Amino acid sequence: MNVSMKVLTVTLGFAGALCVSSAIAAPNWSSVPAKDVELFYPGQSSWEWLLTPSEHPGATKFRGGKNCFACHNGDEKNMGKLIASGKKNEPAPIAGKSGSIDAKVQMTHDATNMYVRLVFAPGSQPDAKQDKEFATKVTMMIDAGGVPEVARGGCFAMCHQDSADMPAANGADRTMYLYKTRQKLTANGGGDALVPADALAKLKASGYSVEYWQARLNEGKPAVVENGEIFAKREETKPTVVSADASYKGGTWTVTLTRKLNAPGMVALAPGKTYTVGFAIHAGHTNKRFHYVSFERSMTLDGGNADFVVK
């Protein structure tokens, strides 16, 4: 999955660890439960591919209502290894790239802010030389219930056959998008013909968009933070309301993303609602689709039944 600039202070800790700190006090993470989230390499797998029985063995089940996570929880390592090898859905494999990344994810909130912490080791990543600026990028997406496809397929709902570097892109640099913004969706994606402006406005008003937060990282340098939305395209929104704390030590990144529960122009985070969240990590100077992604996870605040119950 691919996501002003907030200047953060940089200090060096013990054993050469890099610490990037914002002014917001960190939660007591030792009291916050951690969930294991496996991120895998998806190659050229897309929304249209998910729906095609001749390409995706689970397409019939998916069309019948099954979610990605329900069918493939525990399969991430094997799927990622197969795809990263170039044997399936990847015509341009990156030699030596691992198929998955393990992340421990914690979420908590106080009266003002939501905090999301990811701890992961990228491993020995070959330099893909795609992103000239950043070695690693960490992204979180949030759907507040307005995009049913995201609740079922996570980030695959925003990745299409004609997106950049996908099979039907034909050289276009098309970003992620939601298919209802297009006049027609075919097996090759939705192209650039949008529905009329009034229909787009109704979709947006109904909550049909996905929010994302992204921290862009290099060892020894301040993090660069971006937030935005995926609708008719992936687009950064201003002002930047997300901050990031990041440290790198012993081959492991610890990244905390923070924003206010009620931030201007962003999804309102409140008890009593169920959200869908997902994660992506670019590692080894990769860009666009050459990332690791998680399957969809559910999230609630303070109580309820979800993968993440945030307290």
Image (spheres, rainbow, N blue to C red):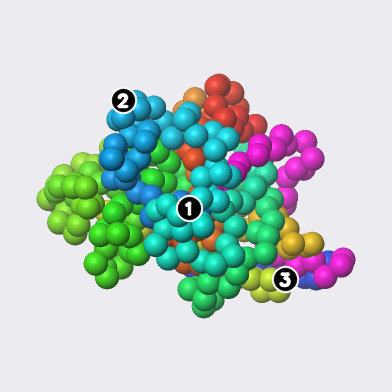
Q: Do labels 1 and 3 touch, CB within 8 Å?
A: no
- From the viewer's perspective, is the residue at label 3 or at label 2 nearer? 2
* Residue found 56% across the figure and 44% down from its top: 78
160 relative position to 246: left or right? left
Magenta stretch holds residue 171? no
Q: Is residue 285 above or below residue 41?
A: below
In the image, what residue occupies the spot 74% across and 62% down? Answer: 251
Residue under pointer 2: 64
Q: Amino acid at mark 3?
A: Val
**Mark 3 crowd level (few <14, some 14–19, many ≥20, 10 Å Cα):** some
Q: Describe the element under mark 1 as helix, strand or loop.
A: helix
- Which dot marks residue 178? none
The answer to whether 5 is drawn above or below residue 270 in the figure is below
Q: Which residue is found at the position 42% from the left and 65% from the top?
A: 92
Query: Closer to us: mark 1 or mark 2?
Result: 1
Which residue in the protein does label 3 denote?
A: 10
* Picture disc at residue 83: 1
Write down the region rendered in magenta.
Answer: 14-40
Q: Earlier in the sequence, mark 1 or mark 3?
A: 3
Q: From this viewpoint, which residue is outermost toward the top?
A: 304
**Residue depth check, mark 1 versus mark 3: number of the one nearer the observer:** 1
For the C terminus, give its image quadrant: top right
Left or right: 142 with respect to 95?
left
Q: Earlier in the sequence, mark 1 or mark 2?
A: 2
At numbered mark 3, what does the secondary structure look like: helix, strand or loop? strand
Q: Mark 2 belongs to which amino acid? A: Gly
Identified by mark 1, the residue type is Ile
